[in-house]
């Protein structure tokens, strides 16, 4: 081997300088492109802040809407409505989604798993308006009227694929050694799942649930002909109910300037709520040290 | 101070093990007396792990894993018992330390009780934790941090925690699968001391690749080759005058 030649090309000062330059340049490019991702978010936030901050005050979050022409008023009914509808959607969909995710990670190769996985992917790609129509046929038509519950059914259906996938992915990454450790102490299979596998993956599952909640809390289309909206304070899930995305939609498409303002305020509030839930998810994940290794 | 029993504590009769159609163990026969340390040696892939996983019936949990022949514990056929009973009598420590990451050190020690839903009074659980950690030579190092997560410990400490976890179930037999292969020399020698100590309370089957380690801690040695038990007997004898040529070649480093 010509080691002299090798030494010369490996230690060529000029080539090394060039490599350093290329390295630095690619670093700059990568940083620049990644920061582009942040741009839309920053722009949206800034725009919402500029237009919405003036509407947000104490009345805005504690009062009911006033009729057109009257100044003031708030959207407390929509805030309460959103909280109720999203919470009910979580109650309805988290149990089946988590169990489905557990099933997929435990029996990845079964026929039922293939079917569940396939349906889940289709469901994930289904337009939300179609899911809204489905909830209308399923709940609103038989009940004879719009209701918060039917809205929760629609949002719950949208939530299932998100939570199911998050659960499956989290549980699949749990080291098999932990199951073996438990099994080697005579722990029966169902207890291994409930006491070892699920708790170890809990933060991933909860994170998936919270992110799913933020995802559905901004959905409008599925609520248009389910929860429908209401100008009154309604806490009864069997009746039509307002929600943040619905008031944004209604107010923004109205011809009145004051209502446009309210729509901006509601949008800002919604994004702040999403932001808050995200923070919650982050805090939860960091607090739960350990977890999957 | 080994108790002389009529029957051996553990007896393997024509044990064969399979992964699907592939025969991994071929008619293995040997018996282990109470309070002995037996090391299981042999080249990589010869079936050592499979052998000890048959003893606590974990082998049948692996996809395609089946076994034939019989294993007697105190004269009782393990196949006649349910796996839960078998595994509570026969504890296992794995090659890589695997404490439960969601549990504290304290909870890890009594994990066998917690996970099985066996309720024990607080006082008893404290006793079990202190006793097991002391036996595993870890008590002094962790007694002030019992509420910390088990995964904060070093690798060697985690492995001793896993030993304590197995001991807390008060097993008759402890299976160790290369318990020191992931550890540094200092942690290794602690675990070796520990094995010698534990012998008073529990019979130990230990897979090891380390010939010096087998010589230091084990009374008897089983030497395996391609799924067969080639030689079984007193460690001292086997290491000085091996009967089988393959044993001799392995011990002198010709393969392994
Ligand atoms: N899950 C499995 N499925 C199929 N074959 C397996 C499986 N696990 C092990 N085997 C095969 O069984 C044989 C014995 O494996 P085993 O793990 O018992 O060997 P070992 O003696 O413990 O080896 P090592 O010293 O490398 O740990 C090997 O030939 C291996 O390829
Ligand atoms: Mg092995």
Image (cartoon, coloured by chain):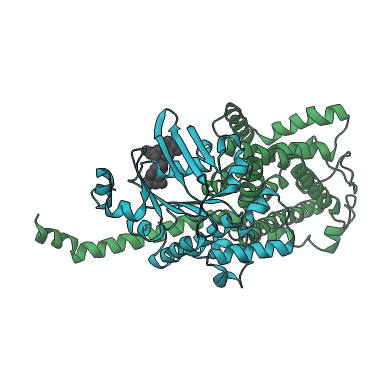
Residue B55 % position (x, y): 50, 42
Vertical comparison of A193 with A145: above or below: below
> In this orientation, does residue A253 appear?
no
Pick the residue in front: B80 or B129.
B80
**Above or below B111: residue A167:** above
Q: Which chain does the green colour mark? A: A
Image location of residue A74, percent across then percent down: 85, 56
Nearer-the-camera pick, B207 or A276 = B207
Side of A199 where A143 appears, left or right: right
> Chain B appears in which tint?
cyan
Give percent across and percent down for residue B224. 35, 43
Query: Height in image: B18 above or below B49?
Result: above
Tag count: 0
Residue A107, quarter of the rendered image: top right
Against A287, residue A123 (above or below) is above
User: Splitting the image into four quadrants, where does ligand 1 fall?
Assistant: top left
The spot of residue A103 in percent (x, y) is 62, 36
In the displayed structure, does residue B207 sit left or right of residue A172? left
């Amino acid at each position: 081997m010509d080691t002299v030649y090798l030494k010369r090309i490996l230690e060529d000062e000029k080539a090394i300088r060039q490599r350093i330059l290329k390295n630095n340049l690619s670093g700059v490019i990568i940083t620049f492109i990644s920061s582009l991702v942040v741009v839309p978010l920053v722009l949206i936030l800034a725009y919402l802040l500029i237009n919405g901050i003036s509407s947000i005050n104490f009345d805005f979050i504690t009062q009911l809407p006033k009729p057109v022409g009257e100044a003031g008023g708030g959207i407390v009914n929509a805030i309460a409505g959103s909280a109720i509808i999203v919470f009910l959607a979580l109650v309805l969909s988290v149990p089946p989604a988590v169990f489905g995710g557990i099933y997929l990670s435990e029996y990845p190769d079964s026929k039922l798993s293939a079917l569940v996985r396939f349906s889940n992917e289709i469901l994930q790609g289904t337009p939300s308006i179609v899911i809204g129509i489905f909830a209308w046929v399923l709940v609103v038509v038989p009940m004879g009227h719009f209701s918060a519950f039917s809205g929760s059914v629609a949002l719950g259906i949208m939530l299932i694929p998100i939570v199911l996938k998050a659960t499956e992915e989290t549980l699949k990454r749990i080291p098999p050694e932990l199951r073996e450790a438990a099994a080697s102490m005579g722990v029966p299979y169902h207890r291994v799942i409930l006491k070892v596998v699920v708790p170890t993956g809990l933060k991933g599952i909860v994170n998936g649930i919270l992110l799913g909640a933020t995802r559905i809390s901004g959905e409008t289309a599925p609520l248009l002909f389910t929860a429908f909206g209401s100008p009154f304070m309604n806490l009864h899930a069997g009746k039509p109910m307002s929600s943040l995305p619905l008031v944004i939609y209604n107010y923004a498409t109205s011809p009145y300037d004051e209502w446009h303002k309210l729509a901006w305020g509601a949008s800002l509030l919604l994004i702040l709520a999403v932001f808050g839930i995200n923070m919650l998810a982050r805090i939860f994940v960091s607090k739960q040290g350990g977890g999957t290794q | 101070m080994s108790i002389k029993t009529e029957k051996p504590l553990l007896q393997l009769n024509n044990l064969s093990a399979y992964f699907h159609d592939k025969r991994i163990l071929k008619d293995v026969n040997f018996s282990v007396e109470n309070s002995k340390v037996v090391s299981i040696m042999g080249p990589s892939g010869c079936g050592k792990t499979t052998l000890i996983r048959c003893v606590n019936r974990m082998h049948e949990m692996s996809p395609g894993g089946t076994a034939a022949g019989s294993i007697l514990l105190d004269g009782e056929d393990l196949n006649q018992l349910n796996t839960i009973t078998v595994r509570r009598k026969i504890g296992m420590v794995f090659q890589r330390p695997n404490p439960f990451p969601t549990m504290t050190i304290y909870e890890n020690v009594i994990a066998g009780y917690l996970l099985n839903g066996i309720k024990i009074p607080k006082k008893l659980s404290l006793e079990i934790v202190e006793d097991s950690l002391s036996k595993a030579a870890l008590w002094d190092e962790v007694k002030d941090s019992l509420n910390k997560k088990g995964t904060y410990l070093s690798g060697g400490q985690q492995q001793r925690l896993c030993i304590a976890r197995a001991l807390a179930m008060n097993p008759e037999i402890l299976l160790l699968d290369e318990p020191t292969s992931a550890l540094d020399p200092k942690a290794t020698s602690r675990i070796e001391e520990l094995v010698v100590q534990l012998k008073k309370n529990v019979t130990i089957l230990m897979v090891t690749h380390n010939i010096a380690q087998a010589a230091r801690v084990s009374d008897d040695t089983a030497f395996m080759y391609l799924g067969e038990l080639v030689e079984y007997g007193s460690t001292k004898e086997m290491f000085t005058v091996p009967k089988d040529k393959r044993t001799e070649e392995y011990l002198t480093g010709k393969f392994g």
